[in-house]
């Protein structure tokens, strides 16, 4: 949320339908925060591409200019 690192990993949790947006696969839970999805999309419009991602799936990309790659968890 500080605008320094791009979102590189997104998961759509199967158990509760929550979305997780991470800057890398090695996330530090001490820095976790609740943020409105609209605020994240305002910062990164490519997140709209993942709106139809099924529960239990993840998407990742190498950097902010790379395409999202989806996979079932």
Image: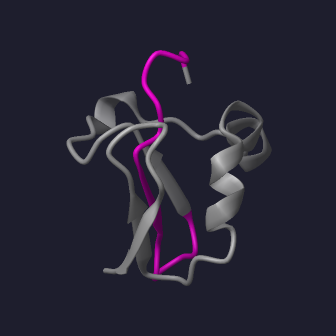
Report whether 13 appears left or right of 37. left
At 61% from the left and 65% from the top, the residue drawn is 50
Which percent across, then down, holds residue 40?
Answer: 67, 39
| 53 lies left or right of 62 | right
Residue at coordinates 55% horizontally, 18% vertically from top-left?
A: 3
Q: Quadrant of residue 52?
A: bottom right
Q: How many numbered badges does the structure rendering display?
A: 0
Occupied quadrant, residue 70: bottom left
Q: Position of residue 38 (x, y in %)?
A: 79, 44
- The chief SS type of the magenta part is loop
Q: Is residue 4 above or below residue 29?
A: above
The image shows residue 45, relative to residue 71, as above or below, that is above
Give the image's coloring scheme. one colour
If the image is split into quadrants, where does the C terminus sit? bottom left
Q: Answer whether residue 1 is magenta in the image.
A: no
Is 12 magenta? The answer is: yes
Q: Which residues are magenta?
A: 2-18
Image point (48%, 39%), residue name: 65
Between 1 and 53, the one lying in front of the other is 53
Residue at x 47% of width, y 31% of height: 6
Q: Give the image location of residue 39, x and y in percent.
A: 75, 36
In the depicted structure, whether residue 17 falls above or below residue 64: below
Quadrant for the N terminus, please.
top right
């Amino acid at each position: 949320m500080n605008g320094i690192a791009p979102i590189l990993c997104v998961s759509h949790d199967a158990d509760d339908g929550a979305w997780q947006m991470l800057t890398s696969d090695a996330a530090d839970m001490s820095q976790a925060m609740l943020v409105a999805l609209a605020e994240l999309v305002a910062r990164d419009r490519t997140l709209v591409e993942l709106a139809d991602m099924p529960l239990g799936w993840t998407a990742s990309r190498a950097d902010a200019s790379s395409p999202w790659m989806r996979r079932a968890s």
